[in-house]
Image: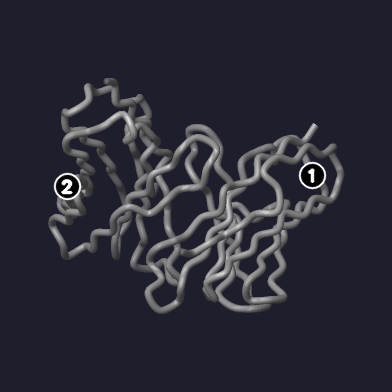
Amino acid sequence: SQKIEQNSEALNIQEGKTATLTCNYTNYSPAYLQWYRQDPGRGPVFLLLIRENEKEKRKERLKVTFDTTLKQSLFHITASQPADSATYLCALAPISGGYNKLIFGAGTRLAVHP
Amino acid sequence: DVKVTQSSRYLVKRTGEKVFLECVQDMDHENMFWYRQDPGLGLRLIYFSYDVKMKEKGDIPEGYSVSREKKERFSLILESASTNQTSMYLCASSDLAGGETQYFGPGTRLLVL
């Protein structure tokens, strides 16, 4: 069956450390993968997109890697701050999806402690 | 800035009621989407629309219908609300041309009693 999985347990880290979140998928052929941030009671906000032929993307303190052999994307936040505390969603766009359909993971909650 | 607005932040309805959730986007986007979000399940696509009066079923369309009479507005209709439709409902839009990014509204938390 097709699945997109994120670690359901919350990730707790100390301020200043690097947070690494994982997104694994099975039985999909992705055209690209996205990461979104969601704060409590709010809609998700787009952060980064990485295509299937790209290995790594960076934006300020954020870095995303994409390994289509391992069927995995890693999302890193360097020099983390308490303001980075939120739920992070990965979303995959299957090649067959059309109309920019996305398949979302359930999200991982990140808590950054001062 | 893209703005997607939803008609209500919170709604309480009774079983069997007809429920309308409205979504409006101000960026002239062709694509619009309705999702529901439940703990541990992530966002699941209910319906999407790629043009006025055009719609396609998502992964969980049962018990829902949609309407898109104008480009900027996409409505989700629960014909006869049931308790298992208690959820957070999120609307999103995206541009056809550079359409990978989806822009979300703030969500409507619906409670069906």
- Residue at 56 percent of width and 60 percent of height: B4
Of the numbered discs in the image, which one, if any, rests on residue A16? none
Residue at 50 percent across and 35 percent down: it is A40
Q: Nearer the viewer, residue A83 or A89?
A: A83
B21 left or right of A111? right
Q: Name the residue under label 2.
A: A70
Q: Which residue is rendered at x = 69% and y = 37% of the image?
A: B86
User: Where does the image place residue A12, in percent across and percent down from the top left?
Assistant: 29, 22
Give left or right: position of A76 versus A29: left
Where does the image place residue B106, in percent across and percent down from the top left? 57, 48
Type of the residue with mark 2: Leu
Q: Name the residue under label 1.
A: B81
Q: What element carries label 2?
A: loop
Task: Check disc 1: other Cα within 10 Å, few if <14, some if 14-19, many if 20+.
Answer: many
Q: Compare residues A9 and B24 and report the one nearer the observer.
A: B24
Q: Which of marks 1 and 2 is in front?
A: 1
Q: In which quarter of the image is the C terminus of chain B?
A: top right
Residue A97 in the image, given as x and y percentages of width and height = 42, 66
* SS for dot 1: loop
Q: Pointer 2: residues within 10 angstroms few (<14), some, or many (20+)? A: few
Q: In this view, does A108 lie to the left or right of A57?
A: right
Q: Distance between the residues labelled 1 and 2?
A: 42 Å
B3 relative to B52, above or below:
above
Residue B75 image-quadrant placement: bottom right
